[in-house]
């Protein structure tokens, strides 16, 4: 298995002096190509901070982040912009899509930034829409679609340039349970059939059980990790719930 992402001793402080907050504390782990990893932990445990470090939205205080052989923590802003655009796909809780563009234009947006010609881009968009079951919605605007359809469109857009890694922060956070499970099936399809490597933050054990591995964060540190292996998803789910019970607390107890 080839290592796609290498996180080494990543530390992140916010603020200064007495108000300093250590959001990440010497976090180290690898993600291999083809993995679907869920990052779990209580509110405030550092999940979003970790994702923001990898997406280079924010800078680490220490440590290194190697993606596809490049150390993101030493790259210049100009290189980083290109890197983010070509190598990373993002799916957030909400506000993924631009309201003034229809779904066809939204999904095709990353291709425009890569100067792919219009005809070829449209062919790629239609292929993606078919794969994600939103062909009927292509000429609609985001406000005309359900939350579940919007997240499928966001996933299609994230994947259209075949990024090395998909980053998702609470992608089911604004969905009801049926749509959440449906989106996790979409993530499994992306992972298994479209070979997408995914790092997803969630606080929901059920969503985590769709991943191939769950990493637990506690107070900015890696607390534990469990692999699904060949086990049934339901068995994995139970193990995640048990781990969360042991993990306990809210991270506020110190
Ligand atoms: P999670 O996503 O697991 O809920 P976060 O990564 O958002 O946790 O936050 C981790 C810790 O860092 C929390 O204590 C939070 O208050 C703090 N934090 C996060 N972002 C900032 C910021 N921009 N400025 C100051 N503190 C922050
Ligand atoms: Mg968060």
Image (cartoon, grey):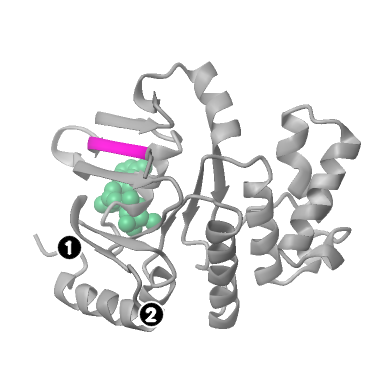
- Position in image of residue 106 (x %, y %): 76, 48
Judged left or right of residue 220, residue 128 is right
In percent of the image, x 29 and y 82: which residue is there? 238
Residue 89 belongs to magenta span: no
Please give the residue where the numbered disc 2 appears in the rendered image. 232
State the CA–CA distance, disc 1 to disc 2: 33 Å
Foreground: 207 or 22?
Answer: 207
Please give the residue where the numbered disc 1 appears in the rendered image. 252
- Which callout, 1 or 2, points to the residue nearer the camera? 2
For the residue carrying disc 1, how many other residues have a C-alpha within 10 Å: few (<14), some (14-19), or many (20+)?
A: few
In percent of the image, x 36 and y 67: which residue is there? 203
- Position in image of residue 156 (x %, y %): 68, 54
Q: Secondary structure under badge 1?
A: loop
Q: Secondary structure under badge 2?
A: loop
In percent of the image, x 34 and y 61: which residue is there? 213
Which range of residues does the magenta coloring cover?
Answer: 5-9
Give above or below for 233 relative to 147: below
- Position in image of residue 1 (x %, y %): 36, 45
Quarter of the image for residue 58 reads top left
């Amino acid at each position: 298995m080839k290592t796609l992402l290498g996180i080494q001793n990543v530390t992140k402080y916010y603020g200064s002096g007495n108000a300093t907050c250590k959001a990440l504390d010497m976090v180290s782990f690898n993600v291999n190509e083809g993995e679907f990893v869920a990052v779990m932990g209580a509110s405030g445990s550092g999940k979003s901070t970790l994702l923001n470090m990898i997406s280079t939205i924010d800078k680490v205080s220490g440590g290194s982040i190697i993606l596809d052989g490049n150390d993101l923590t030493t790259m210049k802003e100009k290189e980083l912009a290109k890197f983010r655009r070509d190598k990373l796909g993002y799916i957030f809780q909400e506000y993924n899509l631009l309201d003034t563009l229809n779904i066809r234009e939204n999904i095709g947006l990353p291709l425009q930034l890569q100067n792919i010609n219009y005809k070829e881009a449209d062919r790629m968009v239609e292929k993606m829409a078919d794969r994600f079951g939103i062909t009927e919605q292509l000429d609609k605007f985001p406000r005309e679609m359900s939350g579940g359809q919007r997240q499928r469109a966001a996933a299609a857009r994230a994947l259209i340039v075949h990024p090395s890694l998909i980053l998702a922060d609470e992608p089911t956070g604004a969905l009801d349970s049926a749509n959440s499970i449906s989106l996790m099936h979409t993530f499994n399809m992306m992972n298994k059939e479209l070979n997408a490597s995914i790092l997803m933050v969630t606080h929901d054990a059920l969503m985590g059980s769709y991943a191939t591995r769950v990493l637990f964060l506690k107070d900015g540190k890696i607390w534990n990790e469990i692999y699904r292996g060949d086990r049934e998803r339901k068995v994995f789910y139970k193990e995640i719930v048990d781990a969360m019970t042991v993990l306990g607390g809210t991270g506020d107890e110190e």
